[in-house]
Image (cartoon, rainbow, N blue to C red):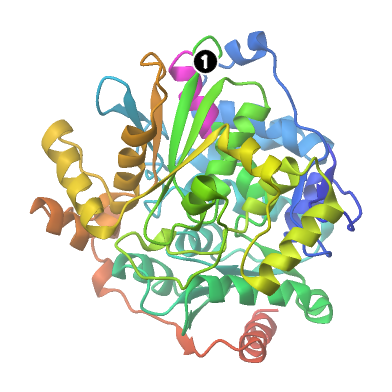
Amino acid sequence: MRYLSTRGQAAPRDFEAVLLAGLAEDGGLFLPESWPSLSPAEWRGLRGLPYAELAARLMHRFTGDTLPFETLREMTGAAYAGFGHPAVAPLVQLDTRTFALELFHGPTLAFKDMAMQLLGRLFDHALARRGSRITIVGATSGDTGSAAIEACRDRQAIDMVILHPEGRTSEVQRRQMTTVLAPNVANLAIQGSFDDCQDLVKAMFADVPFRQEMGLGAVNSINWARVAAQIPYYAYAALALGAPERPVAFSVPTGNFGNVLAAWAVKQMGLPVERLIIGANRNNILARFLAANDMSIRGVEPSLSPSMDIQVSSNFERLLFELLGRDGAATAGVMQRFRAEGRMPVPDAAWRAATALFRGFTLDDPGTLAEIRHLWASAGYLADPHTAIGTAAARAHAPEDLGIPVVVAATAHPAKFPDAVEQATGLRPPLPPRLADLYEREERYAVVPGTLAEVEAFVRAHARRNG
């Protein structure tokens, strides 16, 4: 299995090299040279497998010869052994055709654990084999940071600096990052939005001397391994509901486009995905694109669903590359104009191809609270704000064929957003016992205005201290 950059100027490489590189040197994102495809018989053979076994078998299609299957199987077994539900990613039926795929039973109560717990082990294996170390820099709108920290804390070959937008995460999200006092971990609160944090991470990767000096690595979904490790749970849900004989639809609350891209990848691999529904809050650039080919950047506005407070969805570049016939030069040109002008000139034919499969949906904060209240009253289901946007989107854009089930990605435990849940239902969801003392733990982080020079200086000092 080889990987290409979406901008066409980086040399192809294998999975391990892509894992450690994160972002391609030409600024593009890596994708498989060709999509692995499974026959209906092969898909049927995966039905009923424990989640860790299914994950190993599907991930091996992407790791190729860089990782022995038995080693990968050991990694997936260890990655998911500590999850709080024996199914790892259980399906909960909400009504006659809608199911919540609960992705929040990992150590930090959010779907990012599904990939991060495996990613930390993949990093360890690759670095030990090479006898090298890396400095991971990541941007988070709330959940990626804590999941990455939990997966990589205390690892000998990894230093880590996570950037989050000051005051724009929930208190639980912030504390899950800033109370981890491991010596290889540091947190920066950036005075700006998530998009500002993400831009700083990309700028550090674009600074080639700094990138090489620090041995930068990425845990954001710009790293292909993150997306690949999310593919198995969509396959797991589809198989449980009758695929490949029965088509399914997925509704995904969406910020950076990586999670829904993993659902799209399942379709590329041969499962019958009828529709992909993107749920958005007021920061609805993707919904506007699908409605009217309007991919234009606006200011990021804080909301009750902070993990979706994003205007530049990095992973959309991967879909754009596919929509443009895998033309790297064309993709690079569109992305350069987007960054220069704040508006993405997607050709009409590519936009129409996207709308054939994707639907977009926007829900504001009052609507989100109403949906949380509705789910509790109608199904006795307590949902966080992101999941609620996903269920509302599913109801608005479910396929016309009533026999097609709709799976909603339930991306976070309601206790991560207790204020919103309590406002909607009158119930304040408690943290699980392992996090019960979170509000009493010591926090440690630095607040910076967010210039590239300041952030690079911080990263350099942190990496040297732990080098």
Q: Amino acid at mark 1?
A: Ala
Q: Nearer the viewer, residue 357 or 22?
A: 357
Question: Residue at position x 52%, y 15% from top?
Answer: 243
Q: Position of residue 454 (x, y in %)?
A: 62, 91
- Give percent across and percent down for residue 199: 62, 73
* Residue beneath disc 1: 243
Q: Secondary structure at mark 1?
A: loop
Q: Determine if residue 157 is in view.
A: no
Residue 310 in the image, given as x and y percentages of width and height: 48, 64
Q: Which residues are magenta?
A: 233-243
Residue lying farthest left? Answer: 426
In the image, residue 326 above or below residue 27: above
Is 26 magenta? The answer is no
Task: Tell me if 404 is positioned left or right of 161 in this view.
Answer: left
In the figure, is residue 243 to the left or right of 40? left
- Asked if the stretch drawn in magenta spans residue 241, the answer is yes
Near-viewer residue (352 or 84): 352
- Res. 296 image quadrant: bottom right
